[in-house]
Each structure stands twice: as C-alpha cells, then as structure tokens.
Image (cartoon, rainbow, N blue to C red):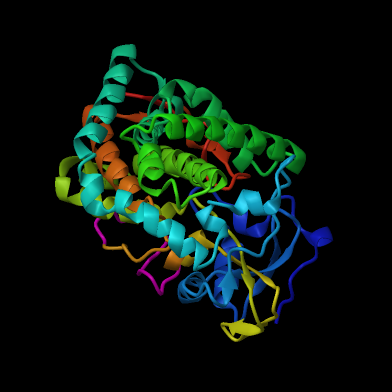
Amino acid sequence: MASPVTPAQAPVLPLHMRRARFDPPAEMARIREQPGLAGVTTPLGRAAWLVTRYEDAREVLGDATRFSSAGLPVIPVPGTTPEEQRSGNLLMLDPPGHTRLRRLLTGEFTVKRIRRLEPRIAEIVADHLDAMEQAGPPADLVPDFALPVPSLVICELLGVPYADRADFHRRAAQQLDLTRPMEERGKVALESRAYMGELIDRAVAAPGEDMLGMLVREHGDDLTRTELVGIASLLLIAGHETTASMLAIGTLALLRHPEQAALLRDDPQVAAPAVEELMRYLSVVHSGVPRVATADTEVAGQAIGAGDVVVVSLPAADRDRALVEDPDRLDVGRAASHHVAFGHGVHHCLGAPLARMEMATAFPALLRRFPTLAPAMPFEDVEFRSASVVYGLRSLPVTW
C-alpha cells in the first residue's frame, strides 16, 4: 500500500489539483484502478490520503462522524483566532454546530424559494447578453458574462452593494489562489472580514429584505456577529466563484463539442440534465475541504490512522465508471444527477439549487442569442486557472 508523501516530495501543484484541460490527469485514472489509497500533499503541506473512486468519495463525504471538517489548520489571519475564522463557516464545522447554522439558511435555498428568483435571473442574463450584442464581437466571456451574472444574483440575494463587486472579486480570487503566499492570503482574508463586518453592522442597524437582513431580524439573538460575518463571507465567495467558473469553462466545453451545444440550444428539456452533466464532467472544485479521521478507520481496505488527512478528488470520482458509462465523454442528454461535484452528505452545497437555476438559464440563453458563438483564439492558447481552490479560465475571448 502507498504511504502519504512528505511535503519535501510534493509536486509544485498537488496531484489532486492538476488538470489536463477539461480532464483529470491520466495518473488519476491509474490510481483509481489500484487497490487502497494513494498519498498526496495538501496545499498547506500536510501529508494526506487521496480518494479517487466514486463510492469511496461518497463514503468519506457522507460520514461526518468518522471524517471531520473541523480539524485542519486555517490560513493565519492577522488579529483573528482560528476559532473566529471557523465561526460561521459551514465548510469548517461539524454537526451539531454545522447543523444549527445550516438549518437557519436552508429555507432560503430550497428549490421552491429559488424558483421565485427565476424571472430575475433570466432578466440579469438577458441584460448581459444585450450588452455583449451591443458592444459587438469579440468579447471576453469571463468579465462580460460568466462573472457578472452570478455576482449580481448573489449580491441581490444577500444585500451586498453590486458597486463593490470589483473589490470583492479581487479579494475572492486572491484568497482562492494557492500560488500566493499564505501571509498575503491572510491579509486579504482580513480585508474581506472587515468588509463583511461593515455590511453586517449596517444590516443590524437597518435590516432590509435581503438574506443578511433576514438573518439579523429572525436570528439576530441566536447568532454572534462573528458567525454572521463567517456566514456572509462564505455565501458571497461560494455564491459567485463556482458558478462563474462553470459558466466560462462549461461554455468552452460546449463549443468544443458543437453537437452537444446544439442539443442544449435547441431543446429546452435538455437544460437540466445538461447542467448535471457539465458539473460532473468538469467538477470545478478540486476537492473541497479536506477531512481529518477522528479515529483509526479504513477506506477501500486502506488503514487510516486517527488524525490522518483525507482528500477527496471530486473530478476523479466523477469520472469513475461506477457513476456513469463512458465517463470521459460529455453527454448532455444523460442523467448524471448523482455526481459529487456539489459535494455529498451534510456539506452538500447549500446553494446548489441556485447554481443549477443560474446555469440552466444562462447556458441556453447564451447559445440561442449567439448561435455562431466560437472561441476567438486557438484552444491551445486558452489559459486555464489551475492553482486555485476553484478551477476555471482566466479569460475566454469569443466571437460570433
């Protein structure tokens, strides 16, 4: 059996963060076929066990008792304790603390509640397509469409001033960029917390009809200011970064598979399954938060000691034949809703219904508005963003 590698042996980019354009590296497939688990090193330098198979991924992600999300070190933020950083951040909490906070938010992200946003999402999408059409080709799909659409949606939902988007886009990208020194990322995180703290204080003084106002009005006695800051920070970053990445890289994948793009463009019934298939095929979140074994256990016959770190490769798990046949093929017509791109278990993405709604609206609208949409540069020159918590594209010049 393989043993976890030491930090000194770690590659420049951890194995579970490497990609070959749309695909996990070939080495991932080889590891998935081998018994036991492989060893990797996390971006923070910890030796870890790597989970690559679909069923193993669901086992680890679905068992918060055996595999904790709360035991890992955090990036040092000046003047802030690790406990304050974890406070309100659902990704870094275990039940029952996690359960308590998630219950307060779940009602805002039900499918029924999100459907009420559908007309506004369609309006936001149409407005940005209008702007692209009026400006004429070429356009850069990342700043012109993929990033602003989910950013405006989450700003309106939370009550964050959209005029502040340039700053919070910058801070989010820097916090998620693993090539930046931890000290720099910590300072940016401090800036972000200070900004969210100002928004929380405004909401406390005059709660509006947005989500921050709701939390203050309905749960202000149950939540500390630090918890409110943590919740708001997570929702703001997670609410735009992942969907923005999917809209950009998903569009490129569709343009590389024109027959799949045509199906999505011409048949409204394809939108929902297409979103699931694109999520499975691309899995833009490399691994989510690593887990720590709470006691001696095993996965796939591999002995795991108490305190060992376990990393789940979501892209590798979603390319497992145990999930779908011919997993390396993009097929927008197939049912792939059991993928783990949104996670699994208690940490399954809270905002998944919102992300699905945004993508199911944006992808078809884009393809219908610009039926001749095409990359404005060779595929080989497209710059992918690998060294980030969320995989994506730095830019995507397009023409029509």
- Residue farthest toward the front in the current orientation of the protein: 221
Residue 191 location, x and y as percent?
A: 64, 32
Q: Is the residue 177 above or below the residue 126 in the image?
A: below
Q: Tell me which secondary structure the magenta stretch mostly adopts.
A: loop
**Residue 10, quarter of the rendered image:** bottom right
Q: Which residues are magenta?
A: 318-334
Residue at image position (58%, 73%) is 67
Q: Is the residue 161 above or below the residue 41 in the image?
A: above
Residue 266 lies within the magenta run = no
In terms of depth relative to the viewer, which is nearer, 15 or 338?
338
Q: Is residue 64 visible?
A: yes
**Residue 103, quarter of the rendered image:** bottom left
In terms of depth relative to the viewer, which is nearer, 184 or 271?
184
- Quadrant of the drawing holding the N terminus: bottom right
From the viewer's perspective, tell me whether residue 27 is left or right of residue 247: right
Residue 321 lies within the magenta run = yes
Residue 100 location, x and y as percent?
A: 44, 61
Residue at image position (58%, 52%) is 87
Residue at image position (34%, 36%) is 210
Q: Is the residue 160 above or below the residue 56 in the image?
A: above
From the viewer's perspective, tell me whether residue 335 is left or right of residue 201: left
